[in-house]
Amino acid sequence: MVPLTPTGIKKMTKISSDISIVLAGEAGQGIQSIESVLVKVLRKAGYNVFATKEYMSRVRGGINSTQIRISSKRVFAPTFRTDILVPLTKEAIPHLGSRVTEDTIILGEKATLGDERVLDVPFTKTASEFGNPLFASSVAIGLISGILNVKAEIVEAQMQKLFSKKGDEVIHKNSGAAARGHEIGRQLIMDKKLLIEADQGESFDTELLLSGTEAVSFGAIAGGCDAVFAYPMTPGSGVFTTLAGFSHQAGIIVEQVEDEIGAINMALGAWYAGGRPLVTTSGGGFALMTEGLSLAGMTETPFVLHLAQRPGPATGLPTRTEQGDLNLVRYAGHGVFPRIILAPGTTTQAFYLTQKAFNLAAKYQVPVIVLTDQYFTDTYYNIPDFDLSGLAVENHIVDAQDDYKRYALTSSGISARGVPGNGPGRICADSDEHDEEGRITEDLNGISLKMKEKRLRKLARVQEVAESPELYGSSKYKKLFVAWGSVYQALKEALDMCGCEDIGMLHFSQVYPVHPKAREYLDSAEKVIAVENNQTGQFCSLLRDETGFEITEKILKYNGYAFASDELAEKIKGVL
């Protein structure tokens, strides 16, 4: 890219492999609608797309923005760099701060924005010609499509789909505004006021365009989820509403419960009866569920929970992102009992790991927590379709006979699981310590001690089937970057940007129990650096506790934003 030229022409020269487009405006100006349509339009045109958003916790006012990366190659992470900016309000440019540089092409209303760098586009005037200034968002959709040489009929088809339920007049006006925006975009190119070269790939209609929220939801369905219970809390609510949208097709019971305590207890009741429910929440909601989590530990009731993290303490920054709840889910609940914590780094992992979570919960009769965050749930990009051939719903339920003992002592710690109504045997459960049949006991040096040891024996079994951490980069690495969860894609791309031959990334999609070979990976490096989206390096502490390996060097970010790949690459170069 080059800055504004003396002739007033803004150029982007041969950046066809990767263009970063940022749209920003006030809440209520349709920024998310622009994003939802544009990514589909650009995908249909043959571009690979990546989209993520940041938004304020208010219904109106404040500034929201979305970044859409398009490329002839696959892209999976945000960048700090902004190639094209479309600000729909004056406050958008200062809000984005240093992301807007001399190289950024700014398309907007110069008089409104008061910035000489702006290439003037009459959004409000054009939208008003179709009856409402709010149609500026539709103009923006057309404008970007026109600049990138997307066929007008592709834009028209997506606008028709977006407004299909709002009547012919709304469809006609918004489609007209988009068509006019498309004309303006093409005119900018033809008049050579804007020179952009962008290579299009192929249009793969069979590929999926999924957010993290959708990937978790579809993974739950593939795992046999038949109910979802929740009290709404951003950013975990997206999974609840997505599953509600598919409830009739997938046979899912949906219940918005009065509070989080009710949600977890309702789910435990459903698992006890043989169901496969999901609970979805965020950190503050999960804090209320800890007594229920302990109940699951004592009664050895399977349980699956999705927790989408956001910054705390308390209400914190409710619409921002952070990997700040690992300690919470690792140590939540009173007493000692095993659990499994999964933290997908890609939408593909989110699908398969959530599906697996239901089978793990059923087999080992422990809580399984799928840990995501706001950035992960609200981000989406195109991926190949899932392979469903090897997936199965594993219930691990037996017919209880007359001599059935729900908590029979076994060498593995896993007792055969019966449910009420399956066979003549009685299924006894109680929150107090109990004997093999489930009857309350206070035999401190006898059966109660054996029950404690039995429950903990399951942890070793779970560790045997733990997800192996993924090594990316050189197998002969000297410097090893360690990450977990949503940092995966940004770190992977950042390492590619650095181009060093002796570095690698070790990514954990199961953070607890830790895979037995984790220490071998760590010991093989001359230098280990952790990359985490929290303030203290919570996963470093967990690794130290589980493996004895101390990671002293960390790259941490905790301002409510996710890592951008180019920003992270600069930090890595500084460390190296």
Image: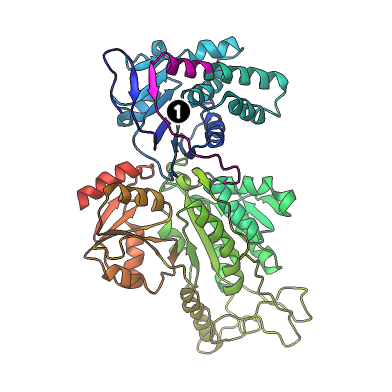
Q: Residues within 10 Å of mark 1 (few under 14, many from 20)?
A: many
Residue 424 image point, x, y percent: 79, 81
Work out whether 198 lies above or below 548: above
The answer to whether residue 127 shows anywhere in this view is yes
Residue 117 image point, x, y percent: 32, 17
At a point 67% along the width and 19% down the height, the residue shown is 172
* Residue placed most toward the observer, 419 or 250: 250
At a point 36% along the width and 17% down the height, the residue shown is 118
Q: Is residue 174 left or right of residue 542?
A: right
Quarter assignment of residue 403: bottom right
* Amino acid identity at mark 1: Leu
Magenta extent: 183-207
How is the model colour-coded?
Answer: rainbow
The answer to whether residue 290 shows anywhere in this view is no
Q: Is residue 306 magenta?
A: no
* Residue placed most toward the observer, 136 or 259: 136
At a point 52% along the width and 40% down the height, the residue shown is 202
Task: Identify the image quadrant of the N terminus.
Answer: top left
In the rendered image, which residue does mark 1 sit on? 23
